[in-house]
Image (tube, rainbow, N blue to C red):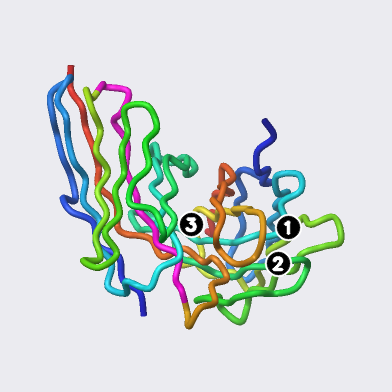
Amino acid sequence: AAGVIQSPRHLIKEKRETATLKCYPIPRHDTVYWYQQGPGQDPQFLISFYEKMQSDKGSIPDRFSAQQFSDYHSELNMSSLELGDSALYFCASSLGGQGHHEQYFGPGTRLTVT
Amino acid sequence: KQEVTQIPAALSVPEGENLVLNCSFTDSAIYNLQWFRQDPGKGLTSLLLIQSSQREQTSGRLNASLDKSSGRSTLYIAASQPGDSATYLCAATANAGGTSYGKLTFGQGTILTVHP
């Protein structure tokens, strides 16, 4: 069965650079969630999209932005990177934007900021 | 604000033992509760989803229960195996006044080690 695809899997950036993370949800899933997991931490919700519209927002810095495109893939854009942005970034997808359905997570993008 | 707590933080058991992982949440108005497994440096694998109207779900050697009134969920693992060694996370989906957009609030996880 198709799973959530994230690219790239690993990314190394320097401080103040920008990064773009991509997420391709499971086919027919219309909802995408982004989470950030710092070292030794539990995942923290950043932002979500349902049918290409932002549906909810968590602790996402103003330096970050995201969108969901017409084919339902999503991109997380991160600017002015800081050392503290180093983390695993997960994308999850589900069917329906109301939270009734199981969320399926991608393998994550490991971002290292040096 | 929903807070999710898991105990114990770490658990080490011999192979073959039955074990229980605990999860508690502060806001009983949840839509559903999901249990995940995470191997070191890897992604999250969904194990079980319990919707708010359900009391338990079973998958193979795993059984998860949900008691909304007490704000608790448990994950029962039968006949544990070394391959079960991983971090187990529970996460709740908030119900904000009858509306939920699905964001998960995670507990800190229980690190399980099953030794041969």
Q: Quadrant of the N terminus of chain A?
A: top right
Give how far apart the Cα atoms at labels 1 and 3 are.
26 Å
Name the spot of residue A57 as percent of width and height, x first.
Answer: 58, 77
Residue B104 horizontal/vertical position (percent): 46, 63
Whether labels 2 and 1 share one chain? yes
Give the residue at mark 1. A30
Q: What residue type is labelled 2?
A: Tyr
Circle 1 residues within 10 Å: few <14, some 14–19, many ≥20: many
Q: Which of marks 1 and 3 is in front?
A: 1
The image's mark for residue A87 is: 3
Compare marks 3 and 2 and give the one earlier in the sequence: 2
Check chain identity for marks 1 and 3: say if they share one.
yes
The magenta-colored residue range is B81-95
**Which residue is pictured at 21% across the width and 66% down the height?**
B70
Instruction: Residue type at mark 1: give it.
Output: Asp
Sooner in the amino-acid sequence: mark 2 or mark 1: 1
Q: How far across and down, in percent of the image, does residue B28 sit?
A: 32, 71
Q: Residue furthest right?
A: A70
Cβ–Cβ under 8 Å for marks 2 and 1:
yes
Q: Residue at x 29, y 48 (%)?
A: B65
Residue A50 — which label? 2
Residue B87, placed above or below residue B23: above
Most foreground residue, B34 or B12: B34
Q: Which chain carries label 2?
A: A
Label 3: which secondary element: strand
- Residue A84: in sight, yes or no? yes
| Mark 3 and mark 2: Cα distance apart in space | 25 Å
Residue A38 appears in view: no
The answer to which of marks 1 and 3 sits earlier in the sequence is: 1
Name the one closer to the observer, A108 or B85: B85
Number of marks drawn: 3
